[in-house]
Image (cartoon, coloured by chain):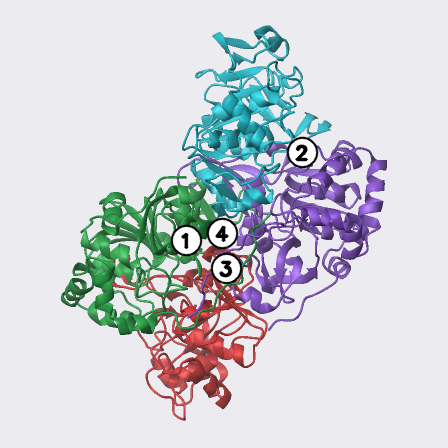
Chain colours: A red, B cyan, C green, D purple
Amino acid sequence: MAAEPTKTAGGDYTLAELMVAAAAREIADGEVVFVGMRLPLLGFLVAKSLHAPEAVGVYELGIIRESLASEPILTMGDLPNLRRSHWLADTADMMALLGRGDVDVSFIGGAQVDRFGNLNTTLIGRPDRIETRLPGSGGACDLACLARRHIIIMAHRKHRFVDRVDYITSPGYGDGGDWRRRVGLARGGPSAVITTLGVLRFEPDTREMVLASVHPGATPETIRDNTGWALRSASDPRTTPPPTAGELAMIRRFDPHQYWTR
Amino acid sequence: MAAEPTKTAGGDYTLAELMVAAAAREIADGEVVFVGMRLPLLGFLVAKSLHAPEAVGVYELGIIRESLASEPILTMGDLPNLRRSHWLADTADMMALLGRGDVDVSFIGGAQVDRFGNLNTTLIGRPDRIETRLPGSGGACDLACLARRHIIIMAHRKHRFVDRVDYITSPGYGDGGDWRRRVGLARGGPSAVITTLGVLRFEPDTREMVLASVHPGATPETIRDNTGWALRSASDPRTTPPPTAGELAMIRRFDPHQYWTR
Amino acid sequence: MPKEKRLSLPDAIERFIPDNSRIVMGASLESVIPFAAGHEIMRQGRRDLTLVGPISDILFDQIIGAGCVRKVQAAWVGNVITGSGYNFRRAVESGRLETEDHTNLTVSLALRAAAMGVPFLPTRTALGSDLFRTNPGLKTTTCPFTGDRLTAVAAIQPDVAVLHVQRSDVYGHAHAWGNLGISREACLAAHNIILTAEEIVDPDVITSDPNRVVVPGFRVGAVVHAPWGAHPSPVPGHYNRDHQAFLDYREASKTPKDFTEWKAKWVDGVGSPEDYAELLGRERMAQLAIKEHDYSEPVDYGC
Amino acid sequence: MPKEKRLSLPDAIERFIPDNSRIVMGASLESVIPFAAGHEIMRQGRRDLTLVGPISDILFDQIIGAGCVRKVQAAWVGNVITGSGYNFRRAVESGRLETEDHTNLTVSLALRAAAMGVPFLPTRTALGSDLFRTNPGLKTTTCPFTGDRLTAVAAIQPDVAVLHVQRSDVYGHAHAWGNLGISREACLAAHNIILTAEEIVDPDVITSDPNRVVVPGFRVGAVVHAPWGAHPSPVPGHYNRDHQAFLDYREASKTPKDFTEWKAKWVDGVGSPEDYAELLGRERMAQLAIKEHDYSEPVDYGC
């Protein structure tokens, strides 16, 4: 479930490109990254080709890459992503890396997110009265439970940023505080939420989502209006730095037809 | 732990050859056989080349063979046993076949066996006062627990055929009756014990070992004298049929230097 | 040698997939998805199937749309490139389809449990999630050593695994390469295996490289020659992913009427691999075919 | 690209295997046993090691004989072709060595549990056996779904896995083929991996066939060029099993005095692969070498 960034954020780049750049900056060099689809996939490719050349990409299909694919790819199963990779193995082995704590960071999206970063990609309504059925977890729940941290990327709309998700597909911080430890999750949790309007992070104690930076063109007010609970801000939210020329060049190299970043 | 057959049983064959032939006859065509080492390995090769051409060999190292190796092998890890095999995989996958109930028959040996077919290959004495340390289970316990049936092959001596083994490495029928079901073993158990003196089987209800056939040259009395409990006989124990010319030819083809069958 | 197992696709489906079967398909997640076999299931109008898989891309959506399915045990059902699976949505929202919600990890563990012959396997995923509310095959349990709270995943035992592979001999010995997903678990867990293969090859090709085998050959029930049998998903060594087909399918599945038309053309009207090739057209096939070969360095199994 | 990881054997052992380490070796059961690495551990006089493995053939017996080992967690320790491991027997019978008795299946599950990050895995093996009396890592447990009685196997987390492979690049990307045993679990479970390799090859050789890789390369700490590094065990593509060496070792290990002599010649006196080759002799090496090559059919990863 990717975001649906359709408008440009002003300047010479699209909103999706801004989000990809923001995602890329969350990856540090040498980290093991569980790479998802769409914008996060692009974010990984950009990070890897710029500031994180030794990042390792792990794909749940059963692929490990320490180098970039030689051609642009649309999905992680595209053959150029398999060719000349560093390990083609079983999903179970990729999940073992995740389960053991070897994966530093992963990216997931959702249809709904709540103030504690819980994500819903399963159903709108109630299990016994489903209004909208969504595709489900895929590997998202595994990443949210087992990676050392995860980044959420999604469109910022009021009906998506809700006080409490209808269904927890991928656990964030539950109802806050030490909830993860209490339910048995040994590590992890969301470290950032990159939206179509800004970047949000989580307070260390309460684990509540707070506004950290505002995309160019958006304001703290717009963001609060599009959030379904009384969103708090960091004392002085920054402006999200726009993509650099280098980042834009890479994004356009990896998404030459702007399939994901129009 | 193989038997230690050193004397000939009369006739043109060795005792070990008689035991290999007896082992081979326990394998029916089309069966999936978890192949061990030494005499059982030979038994499988003989069966496969004579009456059980569609038997499938599974080796715990991670090998499946539906055909014979092109050259004689001494251990299951010898390269001719790997070459042109039908699957080289993980031990876990071989063990999965075993765990799921796909393995019809397996063979194991031991230092001690008792009246209910429990085998000891771990230690003589007590865990807190070990007199003799033996190599341990290897895969034997797994085979005894999970195969549909298993065959025991060992030397028939009084100190080895004991009323109660010092340590159960590979469960037989425990203390008899429905013990296996009670401890949680869903299937299996020993179906025959091929010794240097005869072949023994298990009573359907009590699961106690009884004499089924006597090797040429041995007598029920010798066998009882070499057994550490009051061994009962089938009403009329047969004589173990000697190896046929065809069986002998195959045994000598697969063990050309009589490494295992001298 | 074992018996020959080569069958036509209709015969293989007819013989090994009766109504009410539980089938695992799409085990490699995005690649080598057995579309040809799935379409034959639709043509034969099978009923009350249970589909098991991690993510199936659009194959599960199609079989659900054809009315063959009673229950899905999967991590994700949709269209990888566009999101929603419309037939799946309609079937669930109208109450016609039962779902048991898994993750990629829990579905792999459920199959691995069946493969190992144990009734469950533990994991730390899904703790705190609502998957426990919509999947009776998930419970919490406690580690007997550490006291840790864990998720217990119940075994899923499929009747049949359908796997598309690059090459197989007529006995069911096959080579598969690329990203394997949960293929190994799927085949070890299932009672029976149907292989659809791009190529039927001499047994010597397979035995030249026994590490390349993924499937216990003696458990294979049918081997079907199915060139382009995984289109529009990619098959390493044969063809690339046909992205356009997934985009087209999104449009073609938005309404039941559109789907019926799509199915009439791409499924009901196809009687053979040749029919399918004609429908695809030479130009499109040439465009999808491997253009730049890149062969593996050989290894030596001599002695 | 990642950092180069090539080290000499002494440096690799010095750096990654301190006293008190828990090491998994001999993961392929009878093949590709890392004898050269084990001998370097003996030469460096490491102390209080814990050895983990399924069956190790004679390698564990040798390292135990050198006094390096405090504990063994294994399914079997001995000499595959002759039975008893005399150093192992002496060490256990005199109370110097602690043992935790496993089966091949339980040791593979203990490592798989650590690999998955769960504290235990369930199985139906060992039920009713006395292994529960001599292995605190085995307990009985109950399935939360079926109520079945099961064996729970506690995770074993090795510090280092030592794996001998046919070929590796200097970054730790390696190809292994043959019977793999529990190599995959061992490498996924261990914090660090030392690879000893018959050949150091160009990275392109490895990336030409990513399905042939068994090890997460980014977790490899050291790559050591070690031709004949698994002798006397067999290495597909390189040399056959040296049965005579195993028979000789039986005689050479019957008394501590005999073992000391054997060790002086075959371990202490060996400073390099060249020394070892000279000791073996050209004739014996020629006899063991692969005579009839048998190469795998290539596969295409192109696009």
Q: Amino acid at mark 3?
A: Asn
Q: Are marks 1 and 4 on the same chain?
A: yes
CA gap, disc 1 to disc 4? 21 Å
Q: Amino acid at mark 4?
A: Ser
D128 left or right of A118 in image: right
Q: Are marks 3 and 4 on the same chain?
A: no
Where residue A121 sits: x, y (%)? 34, 65
Q: Are marks 1 and 3 on the same chain?
A: no
Q: Earlier in the sequence, mark 1 or mark 4?
A: 1
Q: Are marks 2 and 4 on the same chain?
A: no
Q: Chain of mark 4?
A: C
Q: Which callout, 2 or 3, points to the residue nearer the camera?
A: 3
CA gap, disc 3 to disc 4? 16 Å
Where residue C77 sits: x, y (%)? 31, 61
The residue beneath circle 2 is: B135
Q: Which callout, 1 or 4, points to the residue nearer the camera?
A: 4
Which circle marks residue D211 in the picture? Answer: 3
Residue D13, located in which quarter of the rendered image?
bottom right
The residue beneath circle 1 is: C183
C49 left or right of C217 in image: left
Q: Which callout, 1 or 3, points to the residue nearer the camera?
A: 3
CA gap, disc 1 to disc 2? 36 Å
Q: Secondary structure at mark 3?
A: helix
Q: Amino acid at mark 1?
A: Ser
Q: Chain of mark 1?
A: C
Q: Report crowding for label 3: few under 14, some 14 to 19, many 20 or more residues within 10 A (C-alpha).
A: many
Which circle marks residue A134 in the picture? Answer: none
CA gap, disc 2 to disc 3? 35 Å
Q: Quadrant of the C terminus of chain A?
A: bottom left
Q: Is residue C165 above or below residue A70?
A: above
Q: Amino acid at mark 2?
A: Pro
